[in-house]
Image (cartoon, rainbow, N blue to C red):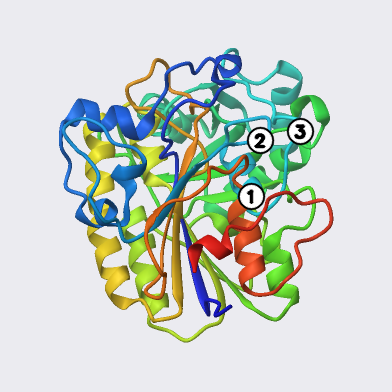
């Protein structure tokens, strides 16, 4: 079996393709991120996704699939308990998460946690609610600058976020406070998936702008993943975007921070021109962070179009023994109620120049089919305790 020399796994963060059978347990009956965007927009310009078979897999609006798709495609179900970034990405690489991370969307963080954070950081906490990051800076940024307090907030995800103005709450101090928050939230009753530093600049309302100096303090994966297996076998494991943060650097050999999803694709294209053997694992977060949570259908659709343009460039740069796998980590239906992620199937669309044929392949019960496929391709055994079965034979 003639295997691939390089695999590019690209996560279109939150691009779900329809509610999972257990969506009712998560309050997500009828959610369909991609399908509802197509229905609302009618048409979007995605010629490259279309030719690979994305619309054959999941159509909507006025858009239909092509007669002879170039890629292989199916949908993947999530077997872990949750619908957050870390749970989804960890599962892609082989980990099943049984205990969902804690969320504090409804009432904010408990007083005991806030008191401990204030004591150790030496700063008063303001905010302490679920909010959009840009909106809470507009609301409380001037107060933070004036009083020296710190803005703490959460979202629909399992996350504690701290905002800091780069001019008055310097980055080093912001990162120090986030490290303290990470230690505090290791307690079972306060266990959040991520603590995130959210720096911004500006002096008054209307001028505030978040910077690219965000940093995630994630829990380490609960076990070894496909990434560890690849690295231990001497292969390259290159991360683009927030992958390195999500996995706490575990199994990563080289990491690239992205300023945006467009930048992340540009970095992936540049990496495709370099020599390496192994995996390039890319996360494109703007679908989720900028458009899904804000329930902005038009913005989400335009982000998909931007991605598609860069996908075309990546496809042109592929070598004969390259494989591209497109997927997602959860849904975030911008037409749905609230601001939360949605419990959905995710796409798996794969293409390589030497692939024998395109078309539908068997549905997989877990996102981990991707990690298992990557490991199988490089003749690497998945670590003990991981899940997922390889789809490699159907992708050659």
* Whether label 3 touches label 2, CB < 8 Å: no
Occupied quadrant, residue 159: top right
Identify which residue, 396 or 213, lies in the foreground.
396
Dot 1 falls on a residue whose secondary structure is: loop
Residue 163's place in the image compared with 392, above or below, is above
Q: At 67% from the left edge and 56% from the top edge, which residue is drawn?
A: 248
Residue 98 tag number: 3
How busy is the neighbourhood of tag 1: few (under 14 within 10 Å), some, or many (20 plus)? many
Dot 2 falls on a residue whose secondary structure is: loop
Q: Earlier in the sequence, mark 3 or mark 2?
A: 2
Identify which residue, 21 or 308, lies in the foreground.
21
Tell me: 106 left or right of 65. Answer: right
Camera-nearest label, 3 or 2: 2
How busy is the neighbourhood of tag 3: few (under 14 within 10 Å), some, or many (20 plus)? few
Quadrant containing the N terminus is bottom right
How many tags in the picture?
A: 3
Dot 3 falls on a residue whose secondary structure is: loop
Identify which residue, 161 or 310, lies in the foreground.
310
Between the C-alphas of marks 1 and 3, the distance is: 14 Å
Between the C-alphas of marks 2 and 1, the distance is: 9 Å
Camera-nearest label, 1 or 3: 1
Pinpoint residue 266: horizontal percent, then vertical percent: 33, 67
Tell me: 203 left or right of 232. Answer: left
Residue denoted by label 2: 79
* Whether label 2 touches label 1, CB < 8 Å: yes
Pinpoint residue 60: horizontal percent, then vertical percent: 25, 32
Residue denoted by label 1: 368
Q: Is residue 63 visible?
A: yes
Q: At 65% from the left edge and 54% from the top edge, which residue is drawn?
A: 93
Residue 149 tag number: none
């Amino acid at each position: 079996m003639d295997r691939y020399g390089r695999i590019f796994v690209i996560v279109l963060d939150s691009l779900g393709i329809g509610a999972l059978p257990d969506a009712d347990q998560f309050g997500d009956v009828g959610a369909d991120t991609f399908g509802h965007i197509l229905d609302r927009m009618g048409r979007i310009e995605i010629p490259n996704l279309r030719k690979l078979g994305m619309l054959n897999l999941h159509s909507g609006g006025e858009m239909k699939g092509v007669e002879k798709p170039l890629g292989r495609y199916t949908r993947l179900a999530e077997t872990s308990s949750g619908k957050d970034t870390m749970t989804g990405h960890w599962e892609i690489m082989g980990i099943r998460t049984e205990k969902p991370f804690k969320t504090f969307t409804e009432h904010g963080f408990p007083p005991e946690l806030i008191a401990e954070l204030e004591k150790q950081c030496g700063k008063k906490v303001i905010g302490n609610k679920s909010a959009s990051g840009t909106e809470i800076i507009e609301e409380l940024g001037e107060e933070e600058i004036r009083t020296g307090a710190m803005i703490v907030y959460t979202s629909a995800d399992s996350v504690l976020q701290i905002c800091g103005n780069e001019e008055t709450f310097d980055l080093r101090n912001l990162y120090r406070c986030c490290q303290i928050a990470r230690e505090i939230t290791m307690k079972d009753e306060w266990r959040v998936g991520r603590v995130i530093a959210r720096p911004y600049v500006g002096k008054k309302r209307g001028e505030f702008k978040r910077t690219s100096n965000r940093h995630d303090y994630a829990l380490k994966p609960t076990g070894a993943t496909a990434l560890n297996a690849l690295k231990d076998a001497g292969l390259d494991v290159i991360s683009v975007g927030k992958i390195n943060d999500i996995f706490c650097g575990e199994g990563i050999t080289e990491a690239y921070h992205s300023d945006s999803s467009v930048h992340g694709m540009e970095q992936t294209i540049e990496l495709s021109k370099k020599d390496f053997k192994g995996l390039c694992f890319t996360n494109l977060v703007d679908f989720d962070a900028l458009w899904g949570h804000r329930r902005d259908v038009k913005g989400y659709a335009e982000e998909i179009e931007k991605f598609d343009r860069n996908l075309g460039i990546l496809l042109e740069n592929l070598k004969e023994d390259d494989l591209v796998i497109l997927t997602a980590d959860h849904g975030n239906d911008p037409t749905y109620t609230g601001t939360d992620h949605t419990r959905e199937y995710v796409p798996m669309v794969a293409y390589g120049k030497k692939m024998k044929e395109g078309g539908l392949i068997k549905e997989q019960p877990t996102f981990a089919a991707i990690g298992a496929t990557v490991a199988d391709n490089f003749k690497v055994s998945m670590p003990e305790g991981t899940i997922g079965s390889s789809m490699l034979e159907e992708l050659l």
